[in-house]
Amino acid sequence: MRHMLKPLDFSVEETAELLSLAGRIEKNRAAYAKVMEGKKLATLFYEPSTRTRLSFEAAMLNLGGSVLGFQSADASSASKGESVADTVRVVSCYADIIAMRHPKEGAPMVASEFSRVPIINAGDGGHQHPTQTLTDLMTIQSLKGRLDHMTVGLCGDLKFGRTVHSLISSLIRYPGIRFVLISPPELRIPGYIREDVLEKNRIPFTEVDSLEASMPDLDILYMTRVQKERFFNEEDYIRLKDSYILTEEKLKNAKEDMFILHPLPRVNEIAVEVDKDPRAAYFKQVQYGVYVRMALIMKLLEVKETC
Amino acid sequence: MRHMLKPLDFSVEETAELLSLAGRIEKNRAAYAKVMEGKKLATLFYEPSTRTRLSFEAAMLNLGGSVLGFQSADASSASKGESVADTVRVVSCYADIIAMRHPKEGAPMVASEFSRVPIINAGDGGHQHPTQTLTDLMTIQSLKGRLDHMTVGLCGDLKFGRTVHSLISSLIRYPGIRFVLISPPELRIPGYIREDVLEKNRIPFTEVDSLEASMPDLDILYMTRVQKERFFNEEDYIRLKDSYILTEEKLKNAKEDMFILHPLPRVNEIAVEVDKDPRAAYFKQVQYGVYVRMALIMKLLEVKETC
Amino acid sequence: MRHMLKPLDFSVEETAELLSLAGRIEKNRAAYAKVMEGKKLATLFYEPSTRTRLSFEAAMLNLGGSVLGFQSADASSASKGESVADTVRVVSCYADIIAMRHPKEGAPMVASEFSRVPIINAGDGGHQHPTQTLTDLMTIQSLKGRLDHMTVGLCGDLKFGRTVHSLISSLIRYPGIRFVLISPPELRIPGYIREDVLEKNRIPFTEVDSLEASMPDLDILYMTRVQKERFFNEEDYIRLKDSYILTEEKLKNAKEDMFILHPLPRVNEIAVEVDKDPRAAYFKQVQYGVYVRMALIMKLLEVKETC
């Protein structure tokens, strides 16, 4: 039995297969509308995350399956002192596959050791969020036609931004990737990413302060939210949150075929005027997220395609 | 693409068609049991409203569709600072139609500007609640066989009662409607309804204090709840809430074929003894609410009837 | 119309039929995968109970039906002052069967008087939880092949433990049942169980302090959680909660074919090392709970088997 706990759980080959299946789903949704009939997805969300939860639920419903679960820990047995291990053993009796969101790092890993059904990590604290990474990869692949030979700009909170770390770790598996890391000095990528991931693998990268200056080089611009909850004091948050706001003005020197991604929700780091720009891809990204989750559910439950 | 944002969004003709479809659904539910197969309704409830939410969900499930969503703002991305516009653009990727409840007036209107799928306003603050009005109209039409030439008594909180304002605005489109407005002086209808809706359209109406005195004239008695949250102080609430309680005694002089409606939930404004009276129609009204929402979902998604 | 309000609502014969149907479901799930197509279960949970709610939802989904409802009172109209009677009359218009959890004893009974559809009591305060009892009975029946002629050990909080009281009341209907009641003196079974149920029906039982000493006699060991919320002070809770922890060591003298049940969630009253013991049946019990709820839904909605 396979689980999806970390972005690198799937090899480059397996990821290619998954994205290829997701692409076939996109082109012919009707062909997959009943492949999960009679199957159930449990969404165990120990902290709320509407976007992610609804994406999983839409994915399962699109496949003809059904959904049960909880949306926050208050509504769960966790408040009665039950362990994740016990909860997952119980829910294994209710569902065929589980998507788990948990504030504690490693909770989905523990769950996978006790579950009788596949576990998908839907985010564990600041740790991993593999289906976001798969969504990002599918978006890049779909819009650029490839995952290699690109200059990828990552902008905003690169210190705490989980999605950024995962995307870096995933993209370095493809040849010809170069990163431009755009952030205030306080929010630069942590040492273990810089040294153990980038330098160790001899991946070219630059760390810069200015969003505008690096713009002309980029094939992909990945924006991130500066999350209030990551800061220790209000002052730092207020000073930094607006530093890296993307506007049409700043996009002037960007390539015509550059694409702007964002894991959402955005607060104000992308001005709404940018939404109309043909390079804005963050809402398309949401749609790709559904397709890639459909593909993942099929793959983990080993559903053969009949079409 | 059509939305349903305000009670008057549908013309008299369109409303007639909708009620007619709802009537056909009532008579032959089985014929409509799969018309929404593979379609998804998102219920985005930024404030809880179990009754309304479950009515929408029952409607979509009765049509063979499925449902996803959230039940309160805590469980939504709103708490992360996301705008309604962004949320609705995201949810457009997950669902085929959206029912939105929001404490802020106009939120569903904003949503409709950014959504790729039809938006149904499921109540926005003290503003609009068009499916309640459609429910009221269907109940009157079904029980009385017509929407015209009637004396309609509206009783209780006419000042803040959103459903009452919408019902008045809708009913004046039919000939021969007369209103009896029954409330304490403090809770009379606001000026913009009295002047801009009733007087301007030369609709006959009387404003009275006594529920009993006006009873014999009424074809419909529409009771409303005196909502605690509308009052500025506890004393006023306590003094007024019990003023207009409907009892069997007060119904003595009512017509045999008068019907009692109430948008529910009731607290104590209708004594439970009245429930057994054949004129009590407020629970039937709930059932009509499901049929009319089924019809509305079909109409907004332009589902052709095959039966 | 039948409801399921108390563990003894079904006679010994009806219970046998129900367990037999649940057994057939277990053996051939596919045969029952669509028997509830087009039907809806409403889960009205006025207090959260994830395990029970998800078990009901899984049961209904396994039968091809669908689910709507609420997970806690905050999300319900109860907060607007609506009575259970009114809520259930409304929800009767939305669903074909209702599972209700309520903190107040007797609420599901009241609901059944006003509902147009069958009500299943999914737990009312410290009072009744009949589907837990049915789950326990099915587990014993399935694992031991019988419900009679057994020595059943009940361990832990026998004073407040609702499931224990219901299980005793149900099992005394079968011949040859003997109980060993294992608890600290403060948490012994209440007088009305000792006198009105056990002594009155001349059921053999012993009350003991030691879990280990009674172990060799038992055919079934039913462990229970010591719930913090049942205690008046923290000290008593801390002193007592660990008194009756089941370990592999304590199981040394147990019969080979004894089975350990637990209504879950467990906190620490069964050491995790015991989970691997072939006698540990508490997770199997969860699975049986789904089958028995499937059978119950079918029976209350009078679905004929076609297989």
Image: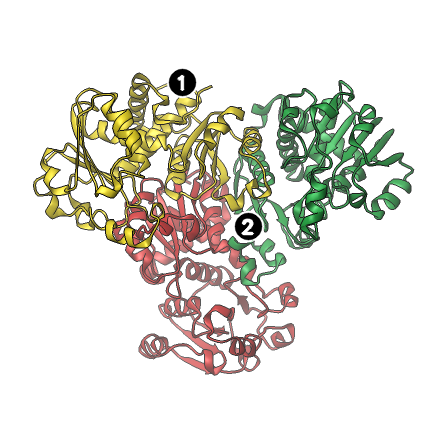
Chain colours: A yellow, B red, C green
* Label 1: chain letter: A
Q: Categorize mark 1 by other alpha carbons within 10 Å: few (<14), some (14-19), many (20+).
A: few
Do marks 2 and 1 both belong to one polypeptide chain?
Answer: no
Q: Residue at x 41, y 26 (%)?
A: A4
Residue visible at 77% across and 22% down in the picture:
C254
Res. B281 image quadrant: bottom right
Q: Is residue B137 left or right of residue B217?
A: left
Q: Position of residue A77 (x, y in %)?
A: 57, 41
Q: Find residue A126 and report its horizontal and vertical position in percent.
A: 37, 37
* Residue labelled with disc 1: A304
Give the residue at mark 2. C72
Mark 2 or mark 1, whichever is nearer to me: 2
The reply to whether discs 2 and 1 touch (Cβ–Cβ < 8 Å) is no
Q: Secondary structure at mark 2?
A: loop
Whole-angstrom CA distance, mark 2 to mark 1, is 39 Å
Res C4 visible: no
Tell me where residue A164 appears, x and y as whole percent. 28, 34
Is residue B15 visible in the rendered image? The answer is yes
Looking at the picture, which amino acid does disc 1 mark? Lys
